[in-house]
Amino acid sequence: MIILMNKMDYATEVLRSLLLRLVDKAVDSKHPQLMLRRTESVVEKMLTNWMALCLYGYMKEHAG
């Protein structure tokens, strides 16, 4: 995700498409409520890093 910091629009689109695939896969599984619990897949780890990058400015200026 560090490489894509300058291209957050592109990173968001990639993450969105991967999340849509993950949601479709989770809907077909036996336990869809376990989807984002263990961060086993690449998309779940990307989501965590994407959120951290998006919230960095807010945390630095207002909350930190």
Image (tube, helix red, strand yellow):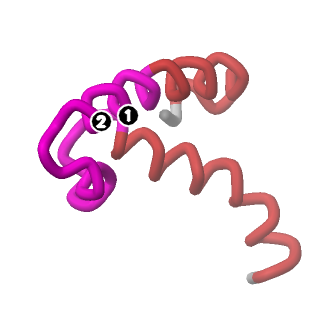
From the image, tell me which residue sits under label 1. Answer: 23
Q: Is residue 7 left or right of residue 44?
A: right
Q: Which residues are magenta?
A: 18-43
Q: Is residue 11 left or right of residue 28?
A: right
Q: Looking at numbered disc 2 in the image, what kind of residue is underneath it?
A: Val
From the image, tell me which residue sits under label 2. Answer: 27
Residue at (23%, 38%) from the top-left corner?
A: 41
Q: Is residue 54 left or right of residue 35?
A: right
Q: Considering only vertical position in the picture, is 33 above or below 30?
A: below
**x then y, percent, for residue 11:** 59, 24
In this view, the residue farthest toward the left is 30
Residue at (33%, 53%) from the top-left corner?
A: 36
Q: Looking at numbered disc 1 in the image, what kind of residue is underneath it?
A: Val
Q: Quadrant of the C terminus?
A: bottom right
Chief SS of the magenta region: helix
Whether residue 22 is in magenta: the answer is: yes
**x then y, percent, for residue 3:** 52, 26
Whether residue 40 is in magenta: the answer is: yes
Determine crowd level at label 1: few under 14, some 14-19, many 20+ residues with C-alpha closer than 10 A.
some
Place residue 9 in its image quadrant.
Answer: top right
**x then y, percent, for residue 14:** 52, 19
Q: Disc 1 and disc 2: Cα gap in Å?
A: 6 Å
Q: Please, what secondary structure does the residue beneath circle 1 have?
A: helix
Determine crowd level at label 2: few under 14, some 14-19, many 20+ residues with C-alpha closer than 10 A.
few
